[in-house]
Image: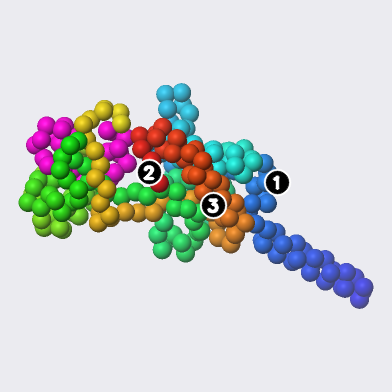
């Protein structure tokens, strides 16, 4: 009886130790054992992730995720999932990482960790090529085009320095900018850069640090320092050797890091 109880206690302790060891095992080890990196994204956010004519998920984030897996010496496994549940899926282990253009916020950092940022996004200032504009302050009293109801409209109006003209969408704004009907436009920068690249519109971006910007990171589960370090090393390497720039220019038309 006594020996039986001791043996049972030993089994319980061994089980607890195994559980603790498993819980403490870094996700990098699990990924290496599985031989694959499961990368989650929405698949509905072009040009970062979307389904092409061949019903294949493609885009900037897909290529970054694929390259990340290659540098970790495993195979990529791209997973599409609804954005509103993507953090819950990561926390509960449905995939290893989210490389899906996720903004780094204090609220999200309570639940997950981030590698990066791997690019920055936010409002961009665009003018006709050759315009003598160096910063948004040069446009005081001028007319700026914005998309109705978007963050850009609120931000430009809050400055109380410009005449504001609203539009329903980007194509009309770019046409009016090219035709000189507005002096500049302020909008989310990446979609504008993509549109410029596709249409060859005579428009250029003016870099101005006063416009709001957002860091975009690679999400992983908390308490995985080895995975975080390995992914940061891979990200740094692809930025240093030109791979990141090539992917960015392929999908965006410029280097967005």
**Residue 95 position in % (x across, y down):** 56, 47
Please tell me whether mark 2 or mark 1 is closer to you in this view. 2
> Gap between marks 2 and 3, in whole Å?
17 Å
In the image, 138: left or right of 232?
A: left
Segment tinted magenta in the rendering = 172-196
**Residue 113 position in % (x across, y down):** 51, 58
Verify CB contact (< 8 Å) between mark 2 and mark 3: no
> Gap between marks 1 and 3, in whole Å?
20 Å
Q: Specify which label sits upstream in the sequence, 1 or 3.
A: 1
Looking at the rendered structure, which numbered label has been put on residue 33? 1
Q: Residue at x 27, y 33 (%)?
A: 196
In the image, 117: left or right of 214?
A: right
Q: Which residue does the numbered mark 3 point to in the structure image?
A: 232
Q: Specify which label sits upstream in the sequence, 2 or 3.
A: 3
What element does badge 2 sit on?
Answer: loop
Please tell me whether mark 1 or mark 3 is closer to you in this view. 3
- The image quarter containing residue 35 is top right
Looking at the rendered structure, which numbered label has been put on residue 256? 2
Vertical position of residue 243 compared to residue 17: above or below: above
Q: Residue at x 28, y 55 (%)?
A: 209
Q: Residue at x 48, y 44 (%)?
A: 239
Secondary structure mainly formed by the magenta segment: helix
**Residue 53 position in % (x across, y down):** 42, 24
Q: Is residue 85 visible?
A: no
Vertical position of residue 108 compared to residue 52: above or below: below
Vertical position of residue 186 compared to residue 109: above or below: above
- The image quarter containing residue 160 is bottom left
Verify CB contact (< 8 Å) between mark 1 and mark 3: no
């Amino acid at each position: 009886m006594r020996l039986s109880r001791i043996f049972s206690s030993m089994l319980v302790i061994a089980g607890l130790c195994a559980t603790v060891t498993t819980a403490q095992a870094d996700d990098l080890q699990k990924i290496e054992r599985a031989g694959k990196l499961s990368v989650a994204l929405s698949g509905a956010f072009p040009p970062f992730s979307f389904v092409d004519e061949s019903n294949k998920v493609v885009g900037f984030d897909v290529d970054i995720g694929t390259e990340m897996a290659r540098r970790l010496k495993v195979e990529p496994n791209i997973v599409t999932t609804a954005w509103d549940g993507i953090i819950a899926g990561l926390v509960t282990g449905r995939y290893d990482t989210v490389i899906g253009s996720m903004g780094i916020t204090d609220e999200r950092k309570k639940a997950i960790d981030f590698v990066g940022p791997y690019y920055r996004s936010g409002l961009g200032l665009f003018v006709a090529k050759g315009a003598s504009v160096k910063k948004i302050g040069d446009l005081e009293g001028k007319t700026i085009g914005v998309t109705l109801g978007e963050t850009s409209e609120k931000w430009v109006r809050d400055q109380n320095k410009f005449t504001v003209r609203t539009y329903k969408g980007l194509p009309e704004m770019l046409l009016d900018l090219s035709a000189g009907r507005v002096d500049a436009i302020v909008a989310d920068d990446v979609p504008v850069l993509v549109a410029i690249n596709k249409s060859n519109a005579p428009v250029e971006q003016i870099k101005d640090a006063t416009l709001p910007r957002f860091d975009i990171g690679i999400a992983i589960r908390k308490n995985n320092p080895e995975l975080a370090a390995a992914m940061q090393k891979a990200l740094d390497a692809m930025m240093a050797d030109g791979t990141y720039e090539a992917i960015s220019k392929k999908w965006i038309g410029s280097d967005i890091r």
